[in-house]
Amino acid sequence: MNKYVAEFIGTFFLVLTIGCTVIGGGTGVIPPLAIGAALMVMIFAGGHISGGHYNPAVTLGVLIRGKVKAADVVPYIVVQILGAVVAATVVKFLRAGIVVVPATPKVGPAFVAEFLFTFALVYVVLNAATAEGTSGNSFYGLAIGMTVMTGAFAVGDISGGAFNPAVAVGISVLGLASWENIWIYLVANFAAGAVAAVVFNLINPPAQTTPIATKEPPYEKP
């Protein structure tokens, strides 16, 4: 149960930060920086408990990587989406009265942008937090948070910069994205997570994908 609570909390604060910085954030607020930092600190806070996924696409990638139990996948995704919905509800209360207009991204560019940076995110997660070569490192949270920040700066104006199906649900609840476009995020994000895991397994020799170290990476025991 503890790991599910950790996943809920981490996803909640990620989406809360997204909503509060994008909607009425005010002058001087830089949403991508705040979002990347929020993800980073939540990973450092909960990574040792649940693995700090906070993202169904990451959970899928870690499953294919073989570092999360299959029985935990559905509960993880459920609590991640629940955390996003609750966070969006809180944002709507905190930012009540602010008019929100949903983005209208071009389908092709938005799909490609979401796929590429979700791939980058899951690829970084797997290499920084599950590979034997980086076992026990202290930078994995920073690397993952910076990847999301980079993606948000690079293609946020193209796709909205979700890179996360739970975030896609959250921004749809907030009205930042249209429900009719949620399939773009779901398909692109899950596909990218799966491809990133396959690529990781291909380029890492079996000796590096077998947990033989006594000190396990943070995602070893979700």
Image: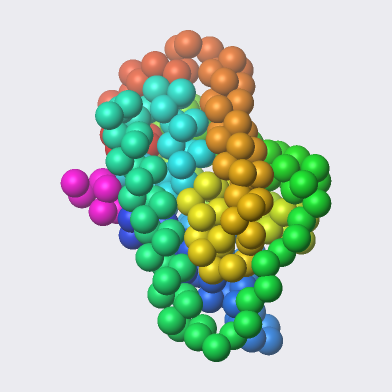
In terms of depth relative to the viewer, which is nearer, 97 or 20? 97
Residue 149 on image: x %, y %:
63, 57
Q: How is the image coloured?
A: rainbow
**206, above or below 125, in the image:** above
Q: Residue at x 27, y 29 (%)?
A: 71
Q: Residue at x 20, y 49 (%)?
A: 2
Q: Residue at x 80, y 51 (%)?
A: 106
Q: Quadrant of residue 23?
A: bottom right
Residue 90 on image: x %, y %:
41, 75
Residue that lies at the very extreme toward the top in this rendered image: 206
**213, above or below 92, in the image:** above
Q: Does the rendering let one see residue 121? A: no
Position of residue 159 in the picture relative to residue 5 (left or right): right
In terms of depth relative to the viewer, which is nearer, 160 or 151? 160
Position of residue 120 in the picture relative to residue 83 (left or right): right
Q: Residue at x 68, y 86 (%)?
A: 27
Position of residue 128 in the picture relative to residue 163 (left or right): left
In terms of depth relative to the viewer, which is nearer, 85 or 135? 85
**106, above or below 67, in the image:** below
Q: Main secondary structure of the magenta part?
A: helix
Residue that lies at the very extreme toward the front in this rendered image: 180
Q: Does the rendering let one see residue 115? A: yes
Q: Please report the bounds of the magenta region as a residue range.
A: 1-6
Position of residue 43 in the picture relative to residue 188 (left or right): left
Quadrant including the C terminus = top left
In terms of depth relative to the viewer, which is nearer, 96 or 208? 96
**161, above or below 90, in the image:** above
Residue 211 on image: x %, y %:
35, 21
Q: How many marks?
A: 0
Residue 119 inside the magenta-drawn segment: no
Residue 143 on image: x %, y %:
56, 48
